[in-house]
Amino acid sequence: MSIPRLLDHVVIAGPDLDALVRWFAQETGVSAAPGGVHPTGTANALVALTVAGERGPQYIELIGPDPDRKDAALPTKFGIAGLTAPSVQTYAVHPDDLDATVATARERGYDPGPIEPLSRRTPDGELLEWRLTRGEDVRLDVPFLIDWGATAQPGLSAIPAIELVSLVRVEPDPAPLRRELDALGLGDGVAEVEEGAPAGYRLTLRRDDGRVVVL
């Protein structure tokens, strides 16, 4: 299995969140639980991941425009504004030390972006807060880094789950991306990179009925 050891969550985005949730349910048989809204004009729904029979803390984030946002334009976060259909856009990893990992990457020639706080409220009003590198709108082929601090990781909450089989990044020329992943210094904590075309992610899941689906 090609599963990043430090995987936090996989981001699947679309131009309409309700349609994205329906699509995911049709493909996997799992209906994502409502997540909440972000100050970036987006909203999400969540599905926990099981790995080798054990639950989480990994999860899938289905993300799209917040239907109640004030700005009618589609948000640019995770490339949503350019999407016409659901797409596996990127993933997040949770290093043991976020600040040290960023410093190491910069010393090695790759800047993951500034570390900034972000938050959202769950449907029952609970405030979730975390820190992450804000390079996710610049490079989707490289994972962004996240630290949940005192907030419970969403993959461990009481939400539906599906089995993760693998997550792979496909690149026509893998060498440049491999160098940048090496700069993060996370070893097998990031997704495997394979040569192929077109560029993108291959997310493989196993449904409850045993059928394997590739998104």
Image: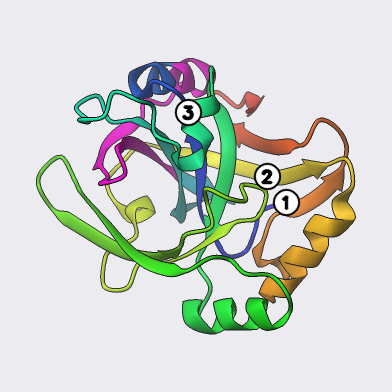
Which residue is label 1 attached to?
2
Which residue is label 2 attached to?
166
Residue 144 in the image: state x and y as whole percent: 54, 59
Q: Magenta segment, which residues?
A: 23-48
Q: Are marks 3 and 2 in contact (CB under 8 Å)?
A: no
Kindly identify the amino acid type of the residue bearing the numbered disc 1.
Answer: Ser
Circle 3: element type: helix
Kindly identify the amino acid type of the residue bearing the numbered disc 2.
Answer: Ser
Circle 1: element type: loop
Mark 1 or 3, which is nearer the eye?
Answer: 3
Task: Kindly indicate the quadrant of the structure image that contains residue 115.
Answer: bottom left
Mark 3 or 2, which is nearer the eye?
Answer: 3
Q: Are marks 2 and 1 in contact (CB under 8 Å)?
A: yes
Circle 2: element type: strand
Labelled disc at residue 81: 3
Q: Is residue 143 above or below residue 60?
A: below
Labelled disc at residue 198: none
Residue at the image position 60 percent from the left and 56 percent from the top: 143
